[in-house]
Amino acid sequence: MKLRPRTFLRGIHIAGHKTSTEHFPAERLPVPAEVAIPLSQHAGAPAEPVVQEGQAVRRGELIAKSAGAVSANIHASVAGTVRSVGARPDGRGGTAQYIVIVPDETQQDAFLPPLSDPAPEEILARIEACGLVGMGGAGFPTHVKLRPPVPVDTLILNGAECEPYLTCDDILMQKRRDEIMRGAKYMAKALGVTRIIIAVEKNKPDAIAAFEHSDFDVVPLKKQYPMGAEKQLIWCCTGRKVPLGKLPAHTGVVVQNVATAFAVCEAVELGKPLIERIVTVTGGGIAQPKNLICPVGAPLSALAQACGGERDAVKLVAGGPMTGSALTGTEAVVTKTTGGFLFMTAKETNTDAPTPCINCGKCAQVCPMKLMPMQTEFYTDAKEYENAAKFGGVLACIECGACTYICPARRPLAQAIKTAKAELRRKS
């Protein structure tokens, strides 16, 4: 029996822009001339380097160790020699700490031994050792998320991929179903649950078909943004509501991205750390849009070259157009959470200057959290951040960007909310 696609209240309907890459298998990026691996590419504390300049490393070798309760190990994504450890431009107008490795010709691996029928604690220890994080964008360390503070009964695999342009998860579901399933079962075993749901938007029929005859509960989702947001996904799949200030685990659910499930399978069965991922390179400003299998730390310039070079791109974005980050140049690199890079032309961007708010209320009408983004911007502009929290509900915002997208005055509403949240965190 075919299930009716699930949905949630509010949100927006936007063009997918996925046809350029959604039906083409991922290609492996040639080994770049160097990789620059960030020490902070996950939620929590940056990892601490354990290698020095001039040191030879093998692919998969630990190069930076987690530095706190919420942190993640980082491994060499190529075999070669460490050229530098320190600050360099991050492609976003600032600097960050990186370990730069120049590859050699051997590309010798240093993976951990495979596990056979591992116990729950063995699975968690392996996931932690391999530096796995949520690959849907948040980058929360997976071993921490799989140790919820309360018992849970359901694991949801997030295959919604509702961001326009991106197809990396879609391709993975189409081509690597078995590994995703095994990885999900390892996570379920670690959590002590038996119910596994995979949720996929209905605009990915090949991915849905791949899991139709599995022993998972397959939940088709209506094409709606932000369908992949954790709270909306949990509601659509289980009918449970995550209270403000609570974790999904408090509703009995843990959500993991399908790419994370794949990485768990490789960590358990191959001993392979999280050192590469599929990245969608697309947009009207790139000659040949592709999905590429890239080592962590690969420079955007190498990805652009593998896709025939850029053409008339006026804006570069890491991630999707709704929640991604604008880039200042091609020195940006692939991280564990990079789902895509967009080369956008003038036709794909809007450079109109913001005009005064007309109080139309559209931002409130589409907000999936039922907030008042225009109020938040008003209080943020006045630097009244406490009022932004009290009256605008800023702390409940999931930063989906729907308000900015729908605003006819082109107000930077989502950016105002992010600013208010950052100031409140700083003051606390």
Image (cartoon, rainbow, N blue to C red):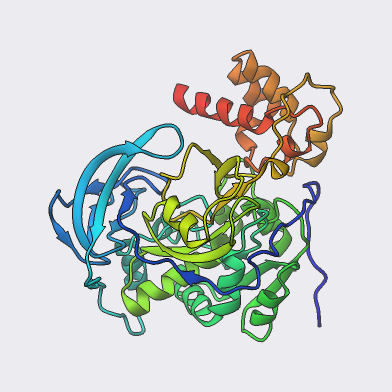
In percent of the image, x 61 and y 50: which residue is there? 285
Residue 21 screen position, x and y as percent = 63, 66
- The answer to whether residue 134 is visible is no
Tally of marks? 0
Give the residue at the far right of this rendering: 360
Towards the viewer: 319 or 64: 319
Give the residue at the far top of this rendering: 382
Quadrant of res 236: bottom right
Towards the viewer: 45 or 313: 313
Quadrant of res 403: top right
Which quarter of the image is occupied by the N terminus? bottom right
Residue 106 screen position, x and y as percent = 21, 72
**Horizontal side of residue 141 vs 224, given as left or right:** left
In percent of the image, x 32 and y 69: which residue is there? 126
- The answer to whether residue 379 is visible is yes
**Horizontal side of residue 362 vs 271, given as left or right:** right
**Horizontal side of residue 108 vs 325, given as left or right:** left
Residue 110 screen position, x and y as percent = 22, 71
Q: Is residue 151 above or below residue 359?
A: below
Quadrant of res 103: bottom left
Residue 302 screen position, x and y as percent = 42, 56
Towards the viewer: 218 or 175: 175
